[in-house]
Amino acid sequence: GAVVSQHPSRVICKSGTSVKIECRSLDFQATTMFWYRQFPKQSLMLMATSNEGSKATYEQGVEKDKFLINHASLTLSTLTVTSAHPEDSSFYICSARGRTEAFFGQGTRLTVV
Amino acid sequence: GENVEQHPSTLSVQEGDSAVIKCTYSDSASNYFPWYKQELGKGPQLIIDIRSNVGEKKDQRIAVTLNKTAKHFSLHITETQPEDSAVYFCAASPPSGYSTLTFGKGTMLLVSP
């Protein structure tokens, strides 16, 4: 079946630095990918929709200048958390849809110290 | 937009018992309903899905039923095992590959040996 690979799985960074998370669709081309954030014991919260070759669409309340999304190819989308602060610590998950099914990456645990 | 309600939030069963998780949705245009299993620290994994032209679908110990008139769908796990313990999410979406999924809040299933 289709596979979505996300890297890194875990990252610790200092406050004020930037962190890049990669999401790759391995078995299919994904013109659209999705980025989610998940707090402990809560559901997935959609942050933005990443569109290949164009600007991402951000959900209300998500700062586009803080969470930079680049979808430069049909198999790769990146999320960069800029000037990270401790409140940005969370579990970030990407997703890509095939013809119908949606597959998720392994998630990235970001800890900002 | 779509709204998905999921119940219960926590479900504890004994090994070998059956478990049922129920979801309702609001948008009659939705016609794709996947279920995901999420283990601690990992991304969600698709376990079964159903489309609105089907009323029931089975895959070994897992089954999903859909009542499109009532706008609800359910996940049934029979002969539960400790390894079934995880958080389960239902979701709904239109069939388009460019549409995101709307998730329920999740059900934590605990299977005791």
Image (cartoon, rainbow, N blue to C red):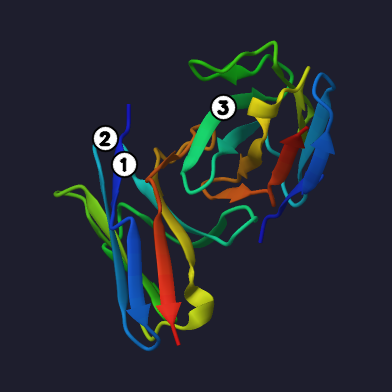
**Residue at figure coordinates x 58%, y 35% from the top left:** A36
Q: Separation of disc 3 and disc 2 at Cα?
A: 21 Å
**Residue at figure coordinates x 29%, y 69% from the top left:** B20
Figure quadrant of the C terminus of chain A = top right
Pick out the residue farthest to the top: A65
Q: Nearer the viewer, residue A73 or B113?
A: B113
Q: Looking at the picture, does residue B76 appear above or below residue B8? A: below
The chain holding disc 2 is B
Q: Separation of disc 1 and disc 3 at Cα?
A: 18 Å
Q: Earlier in the sequence, mark 1 or mark 2?
A: 1
Q: Which residue is mark 2?
A: B27
Q: Nearer the viewer, residue B102 or B84?
A: B84
Q: Which residue is mark 1?
A: B4
Residue B48 locus on image (x, y percent) = 46, 63
**Residue at figure coordinates x 82%, y 30% from the top left:** A20
Q: Looking at the picture, does residue B3 appear above or below residue A72? A: below
- Same chain? Circles 1 and 2: yes
Q: Amino acid at mark 2?
A: Asp
The chain holding disc 1 is B
Identify the element where label 3 is drawn: strand
Q: Looking at the picture, does residue A96 appear above or below residue B14? A: above
Residue B19 locus on image (x, y percent) = 32, 74
Q: Separation of disc 1 and disc 2 at Cα?
A: 9 Å
Q: Nearer the viewer, residue A98 or A89?
A: A89
Query: Badge 1: how crowded within 10 Å, few (<14), some, or many (20+)?
Result: many
Q: Which residue is mark 3?
A: A47
Q: Nearer the viewer, residue A74 or A71?
A: A71
Tell me, for residue A4, which label it has, or none.
Answer: none
